[in-house]
Amino acid sequence: MQTAVAKRLRIVVIGAMTFLGLGGCGRNGGGKMHDVEHVSVSINRPLADVYGFASDPRNLVRWAAGLAGSEVKKDGDDWVADAPFGKVRVKFAPPNPYGVMDHDVRLESGVTVHNPMRVVPHGEGSEFIFTVIRQPGTSDEKFATDKAAVAKDLRTLKDLLERNPR
């Protein structure tokens, strides 16, 4: 049987977690969970080099064909790009020492897609991880195509960084 203090503490903790958006699915907490696939590539470069290059939106056109088909331009707090599926507005996580490069992509339709992206140490090099989240109504075929596009972009990033020191 819970004591009154333990019961109140549990209520406070649950309330705090809900307020902070912890413990649920997605950044806003709660909601229906969707299929995810972690696509990754090992890159024989230090984390600082990989993060420094990949976190600069101006470099997207060099490696992220699935997002940027042309120059990426700053517009307020967002970056604007012409993607294969139309003009997009992208907002990145602020620079950080943890290798987090999450970004929200707002489509022309107004839909915003959150994309978790990380680079972590892996031996003397790095592991670059992109989490592909199946969007509502996405067919198995389209989800597979999305994963393949991300894998291709990550291979391009790997080739670029391992071939070119900067």
Image: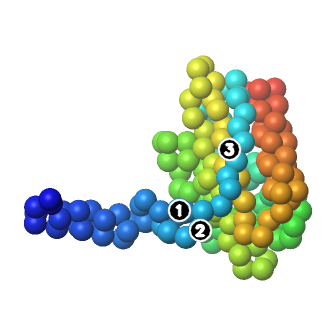
Which three-letter amino acid code belongs to the residue tagged 1? Cys
Estimate the x, y position of residue 96 in percent, counting from the top left: 50, 47
* Res 37 visible: yes
**According to the image, label 2 marks what residue?**
32
How far is disc 2 from disc 1 in space, using C-alphas?
A: 7 Å
Q: Which quarter shows the C terminus?
A: top right
Name the secondary structure under disc 3: strand
- Asked if 61 appears above or below 87 in the picture, the reply is above
Residue lying at the far front in this picture: please name it: 1
| Residue 153 visible in this rendered orientation of the protein | no
Question: Is 96 placed left or right of 83 in the picture?
Answer: left
Q: Residue at x 78, y 80 (%)?
A: 109
Whether label 2 touches label 1, CB < 8 Å: yes
Question: Residue sitting at 72 percent across and 69 percent down?
Answer: 136
Nearer to us in this view, 73 or 133: 133
Return the x and y of residue 21 as percentages of the image width and height.
43, 65
Measuring 42% from the left and 61% from the top, which residue is drawn there? 22
Residue 54 in the figure: left or right of residue 13: right
Q: Earlier in the sequence, mark 3 or mark 2?
A: 2
- Three-letter amino acid code of the residue under disc 2: Lys
Question: Residue 63, located in which quarter of the rendered image?
Answer: top right
Residue marked by disc 1: 25
Residue matched to label 3: 38
The mark nearer the N terminus, 3 or 1, is 1
Question: Could you tell me how far apart the alpha carbons at marks 3 and 1 are, in whole angstroms?
Answer: 16 Å
Sequence-wise first label, 2 or 1? 1
What is the C-alpha distance between the residues marked 3 and 2?
19 Å
Residue extending farthest to the bottom is: 109
Q: Amino acid at mark 3?
A: His
Q: Is residue 165 above or below residue 86?
A: above
Q: Residue at x 62, y 53 (%)?
A: 116
x, y percent for residue 12? 23, 67
